[in-house]
Each structure stands twice: as C-alpha cells, then as structure tokens.
Image (cartoon, rainbow, N blue to C red):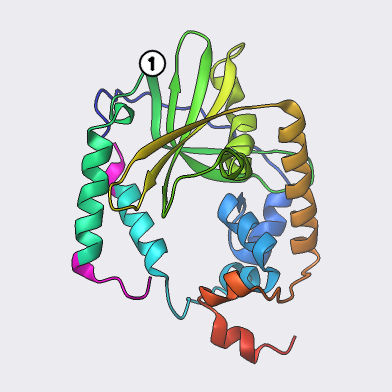
C-alpha cells in the first residue's frame, strides 16, 4: 500500500451501449479493454486465439510474470532463476519505498480503480483499471506503474500514453475544470533499480486520434478480420506459436 493513501470511490460511467451486446456475443465480454485493443493491433490472430477462441497460452514470458508480481506488490529472460528474480524484485521494491513516489502528493481518489464508459458511438464500452488517481488544487493525475529493463525515453513515455489518454476521457468528470495529467512511474530492472517519473499532457488532438484508432480496431474485430501478423519481436515471445503454425484460416 502506498504511504498516505486514503481511498475515495471513483465514479465510473455506465451505459446501454448497443455495441456492448455485439462484443458479448463475439467474446463473452460486453466491453473492450486496452489489453484487447493492444493485442489486436499487435496481431489480429493472437487476438482471436485469446479473446474469441478463449485458448490458454502455451507459455508465458518471465517478463510478464515478473511485471505482474511487482505490480501487485506495489499496490499501495529465459536464463533467469527464481532466486535471481526474487533478489531483483526485492531491490526494486526497496528502491520504490525509498523514493518520493511512495508518498502520494494530493488527495487520493482511487487505487487500482475500475473505470468504464463509452468512448464513441458504435464502439463497446472501454473497461479498465487505473493504478492510482490523485488530485491537487488544479490537476487530476492518472498514474500507471511500469517495470522496464532500462530507462524510458520521453518518446517511449509518449508512445505508451494512449491507454491513459483513453482513461482520461472517461475520468474527466471526476474533477471538472481541472487539468488532466498522465503519469508513468517506471521501475527499472537494472543492477541498481531506479524510479522514473514521466508526466504527460492530455491534449484533445491526441485523445481524438487515439479514440479514432480504437474505433477502427473495433470495426475490424466486429468484421472478424483476423489474420497473422508475423514479427521478429512479437512472435518470439508469443504464447500461441504452435497454434499459429497450425492455423489455416
């Protein structure tokens, strides 16, 4: 638990969005998540395996398992061993607890807070969780925790910001009139772990661009336009390599 956290309920929006039923029939879930959107953009066939066919992955990468464990603890490579991962995790958590990031500035509105609402007509509701929501005198800050093998560049932080931009569109009513800010806290998996903070401005043009991208993704999903997208990086860590090799359309 983050020091100083005092929880307040975050209001989420609900709707009778007709596209939700389309999503439920196709995937069993009456909403879209950022993970689903990102998966489709990476590889439409991987999306089909995971969300439509409901197939379990053949394997999970150590990076995914490690990142999930660190993320849960914060709450508020193939050659890696359990002992080495435990030691690295302990160093990272110690670095986090000793950093200013462990003490929240402002009023805490939510930790691991659910959020859901309609982004645009014709697209199912977006559902997700925001790691940390805070407000101060003039800002509403949406924070996401990440682990990384190296420090992020400003360009990486901007590229990763789409998820929080979408959440900002749904969370704007929490603090009317206040400036919306996205914030990444990146814990590096280096010999001497460090905590990086990346703040981002929520610009209407970037939000609109991201929403349009989600709209196009949903149209492709609803049309069942699923196909493999070979990638040297993506395929190497994919949990559906065998199923993909056997796919014939």
Q: Quadrant of the C terminus?
A: bottom right
Q: Could you say where residue 33 lies in the image, as x and y percent from the top left? A: 58, 51
222 or 235, which is in the foreground? 235
| The stretch drawn in magenta includes residue 63 | no
Quarter of the picture containing the N terminus is: top left
Q: Position of residue 187 (x, y in %)?
A: 37, 44
Main SS type for the magenta part? loop
Mark 1 neighbour class, 10 Å CA radius: few under 14, some 14 to 19, many 20 or more: some
Residue found at the very far front of the displayed protein: 191
Instruction: Count the numbered circles shown.
Output: 1
Residue 239 lies, with reference to residue 28, above or below; the image says below
Toward the viewer: 213 or 229? 229
- Identify the residue position indicated by label 1 in the image: 106
Q: Is residue 76 magenta?
A: yes
Q: Residue at x 63, y 35 (%)?
A: 165
- Give the magenta range: 73-83
Q: What x and y, as percent, mark residue 145?
A: 42, 42
- The quarter of the picture where residue 2 lies is top left
Secondary structure at numbered mark 1: loop
Residue drawn at (37%, 56%) of the image: 68
- Relative horizontal placement of residue 119, taking residue 175 as reference (left or right): right
Q: Nearer the viewer, residue 197 or 64?
A: 197
């Amino acid at each position: 638990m983050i020091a100083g956290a005092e929880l307040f309920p975050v209001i989420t929006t609900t709707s009778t969005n007709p596209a939700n039923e389309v999503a439920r029939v196709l995937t069993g879930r009456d909403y879209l998540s950022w993970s689903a959107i990102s998966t489709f953009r990476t590889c439409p066939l991987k999306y089909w395996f995971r969300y439509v066919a409901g197939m379990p992955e053949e394997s999970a990468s150590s990076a995914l398992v490690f990142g999930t464990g660190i993320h849960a603890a914060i709450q508020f490579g193939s050659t890696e061993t359990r002992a080495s991962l435990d030691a690295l995790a302990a160093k990272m958590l110690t670095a986090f607890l000793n950093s200013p990031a462990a003490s929240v500035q402002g009023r805490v509105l939510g930790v691991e807070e659910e959020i859901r609402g309609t982004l645009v007509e014709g697209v199912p509701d977006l559902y997700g969780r925001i790691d940390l929501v805070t407000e101060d005198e003039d800002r509403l800050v949406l924070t996401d925790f990440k682990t990384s093998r190296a420090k992020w560049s400003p360009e990486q932080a901007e590229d990763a910001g789409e998820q929080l931009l979408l959440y900002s569109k749904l969370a704007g009513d929490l603090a009317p009139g206040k400036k919306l800010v996205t914030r990444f806290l990146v814990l590096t998996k280096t010999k001497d772990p460090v905590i990086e903070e990346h703040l981002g401005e929520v610009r209407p043009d970037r939000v609109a661009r991201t929403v349009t991208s989600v709209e196009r993704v949903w149209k492709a999903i609803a049309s069942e336009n699923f196909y493999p997208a070979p990638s040297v990086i993506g395929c190497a860590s994919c949990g559906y390599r065998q199923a993909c090799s056997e796919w014939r359309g």
